[in-house]
């Protein structure tokens, strides 16, 4: 009976998590129903930046969705790699052949400007930006044909200095690990962001999409200002807001391709995400323990003397997770998930959350880093600085 107080504490946190989940479910519907702005007048010219690194599942299909935009203005797509032998290069060349009327540029440049390799890639690519609006989007994103028009319409609203996008998980295959990865996005990331932004507690910016003007990019110091940041997307958002404007979040979501094929890959990339969030907002991240209602209730129920009421709380927590999942699917038009995976997903998420406090090491695109308190990346090994460039 010595630990019964701990059981009560865990169950209380779990009940708070149930309330949190139901509130997020209600706010999701309200968020998705907000009126969306419409692009008025001449469509400004747009440059889309797509930093690439290696071959990814569905890479051609993902990139192709950005080449199929129903947009009235001129569009340029700039792809960038840092290795002349990168297997993504033939994919870009296939796209160039398939879309000869679209301006597609390829930058191959090995120069390393800081510890963040993605930002170094963007620095190398930035010299090719030809248009007034810049849209940065990760390589594993999937978008609909109206994506660009909706993003530019948001950017044109008064007081808006940047635009970012919510995203949902899209399993690249039928394997359990890809589905678990998609669930992590849809039942943890999405509701947390909806809750945080709806209550004014969070001001996020995501690599899924960051849109701004070329003028704004120059005013925040270009990509060079973020060359050592782990959370480069968050840092860019902060810099855009510091310029006096808002970073808007449209009411739709875009797809994030989930490619995990084993537990190791799933664990590694989720640990990097968690440690990034921990560094950006340590207090908020620690407080997010209440979002792990089912594992908390389960641990409370396993303590000797907890009683049957603890099992009732665990069942309630799982039911609330299912309600939240269904609500998010309906609000954002997402495909239904295999709900039987939810308890497995929640237990894995809690374990990863707890382990994220142990150390600051992360693995990113096959490279190992340490993360210091301000979010700066420190490479475990020195990185080369060979240079060279070419274009498509």
Image: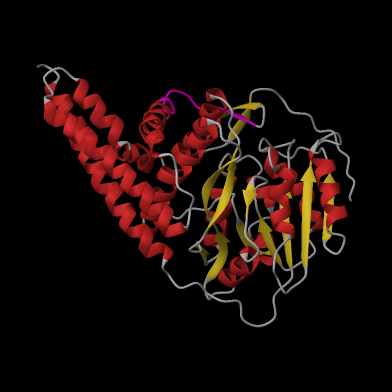
Q: 272 left or right of 218? A: left
Choose between 312 and 17: the one closer to the eye: 312
Question: Which part of the image, by quadrant, shows the N terminus?
Answer: top left
Residue 373 visible in the current orientation: no
Choose between 253 and 365: the one closer to the eye: 253
Who's the residue at 63% across and 49% down the image? Answer: 141
Residue 58 coordinates in the image, percent (x, y)? 69, 42
Relative height, residue 284 to residue 354 (above, below)? below
Tell me how many marks there are.
0
Relative height, residue 252 to residue 379 (above, below)? below
Q: Is residue 358 magenta?
A: yes
Relative height, residue 319 to residue 73 (above, below)? above
Residue 187 coordinates in the image, percent (x, y)? 41, 44
Residue 179 coordinates in the image, percent (x, y)? 51, 37
Who's the residue at 28% across and 53% down the image? Answer: 23
Q: Is residue 78 magenta?
A: no
User: From this viewpoint, which residue is outermost toward the bottom?
Assistant: 41
Q: 157 left or right of 68? A: left
Colour pattern of the rendering: secondary structure
Who's the residue at 44% across and 37% down the image? Answer: 278
Residue 65 visible in the current orientation: yes
* Magenta span of residues: 355-364
Residue 143 coordinates in the image, percent (x, y)? 62, 56
Who's the residue at 73% across and 43% down the image? Answer: 52
């Amino acid at each position: 009976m010595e630990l019964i107080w701990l059981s009560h504490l865990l169950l209380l946190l779990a009940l708070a998590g149930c309330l949190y989940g139901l509130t997020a479910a209600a706010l999701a519907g309200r968020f998705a129903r907000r009126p969306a702005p419409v692009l008025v007048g001449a469509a400004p010219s747009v440059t889309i930046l797509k930093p690439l690194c290696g071959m990814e599942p569905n890479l051609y299909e993902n990139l192709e969705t950005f080449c199929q935009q129903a947009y009235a203005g001129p569009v340029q797509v700039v792809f960038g790699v840092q290795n002349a032998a990168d297997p993504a290069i033939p994919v870009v060349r296939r796209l160039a052949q398939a879309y000869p009327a679209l301006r597609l540029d390829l930058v191959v440049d090995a120069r390393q400007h800081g510890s963040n390799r993605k930002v170094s890639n963007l620095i190398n690519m930035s010299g090719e930006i030809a248009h007034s609006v810049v849209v940065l989007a990760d390589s594993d994103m999937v978008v609909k044909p109206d994506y660009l028009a909706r993003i530019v319409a948001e950017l044109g609203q008064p007081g808006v200095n940047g635009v970012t996008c919510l995203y949902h998980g899209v399993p690249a295959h039928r394997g359990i690990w890809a589905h678990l990865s998609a669930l992590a996005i849809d039942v943890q990331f999405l509701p947390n962001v909806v809750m945080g932004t709806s209550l004014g507690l969070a001001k996020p910016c995501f690599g899924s999409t960051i849109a701004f003007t070329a003028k704004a990019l120059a005013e925040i110091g270009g990509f060079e200002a973020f060359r050592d940041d782990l959370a480069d997307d968050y840092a860019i958002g902060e810099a855009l807001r510091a310029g006096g404007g808002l970073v808007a979040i449209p009411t739709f979501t875009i797809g994030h391709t989930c490619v995990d094929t084993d537990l190791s890959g799933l664990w590694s990339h989720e640990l990097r995400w968690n440690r990034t969030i921990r560094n950006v907002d340590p207090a908020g991240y620690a407080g997010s323990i209440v979002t792990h209602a089912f594992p908390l209730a389960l641990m409370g129920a396993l303590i000797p003397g907890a009683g049957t009421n603890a099992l009732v709380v665990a069942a309630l927590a799982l039911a609330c997770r299912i309600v939240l999942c269904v609500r998010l699917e309906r609000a954002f038009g997402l495909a239904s998930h295999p709900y039987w995976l939810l308890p497995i997903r929640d237990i894995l998420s809690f374990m990863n959350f707890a382990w994220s406090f142990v150390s600051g090491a992360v693995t990113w695109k096959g490279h190992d880093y340490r993360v210091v308190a301000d979010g700066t990346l420190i490479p475990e090994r020195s990185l080369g600085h060979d240079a060279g460039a070419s274009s498509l």
